[in-house]
Amino acid sequence: MDYPEAVIEKAKRLEQLLQRVAAGEALGEVSAEMGISLTRKQLKGLQKKYKAGGQCWQALLDGRYGHPIKANSAIRAWLYERRRQEAEVRSPQLAQEVAAKFGVELTPEHINYLLRQRGLTAPVGRPFKKEKEAEAAAGEAQPEVRSLENAGLFFPGSSQRRAGGKADD
């Protein structure tokens, strides 16, 4: 595995620190001189790892030196431009488009995170359904008017009060 130069240098410096501490020097002095801050507990863990790995600096290589970047600069630029062109598009749809166009699976949450960093968040609330928008624009959706003729069925005596008569108590 190819490690970054900084990770290799850190492992070599840790090996020097372990060798100097094993030779009898004080941990506080050596760590201050080398610019590495270690506690006794961390030192014991490194000594154990160093010994188990054959007492070579390769045993001290840290395998966690970053995460692979799925949303590279080209994908982010495309996302930002897509959101600027159409502000109503939501992150699940953007995730599908990114998967189709770039072959990279991004979660809608991560897309929202990336858009939030640039101030390109979507309007608050649920988006309108597109078919209702089209009907409203065409003027086809008229509110339904219901008759109140039988309303007295549910409230006995209410029609008598309304007509000016007295209700039986």
Image (cartoon, rainbow, N blue to C red):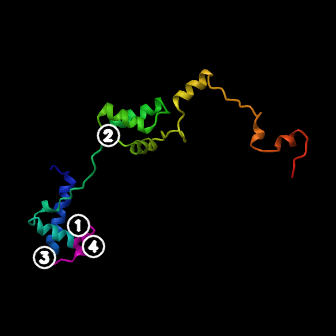
Q: Which residues are magenta?
A: 22-43
Which residue is labeled 2 in the image?
Answer: 105
Q: Amino acid at mark 2?
A: Glu
User: Residues under labels 2 and 4: Cα distance?
Assistant: 40 Å
- Which one is earlier in the sequence, the residue at label 3 or at label 1? 3
Which residue is labeled 3 in the image?
Answer: 23
- SS at badge 3: loop
- The foreground one among 157 and 44 is 157
Q: Amino acid at mark 1?
A: Met
Q: Residue at x 17, y 71 (%)?
A: 47
Judged by depth in the image, the label closer to the viewer, 4 or 1, is 4
Q: Amino acid at mark 3?
A: Ala
Vertically, is 22 above or below 71? below
**Mark 3 crowd level (few <14, some 14–19, many ≥20, 10 Å Cα):** few
Q: Amino acid at mark 4?
A: Thr
- SS at badge 2: loop
Q: Residue at x 15, y 78 (%)?
A: 24
Judged by depth in the image, the label closer to the viewer, 2 or 3, is 2
Which residue is labeled 4 in the image?
Answer: 39
User: Residues under labels 4 and 3: Cα distance?
Assistant: 18 Å
User: Residues under labels 2 and 3: Cα distance?
Assistant: 51 Å
Which residue is labeled 1 in the image?
Answer: 34
**Mark 1 crowd level (few <14, some 14–19, many ≥20, 10 Å Cα):** few
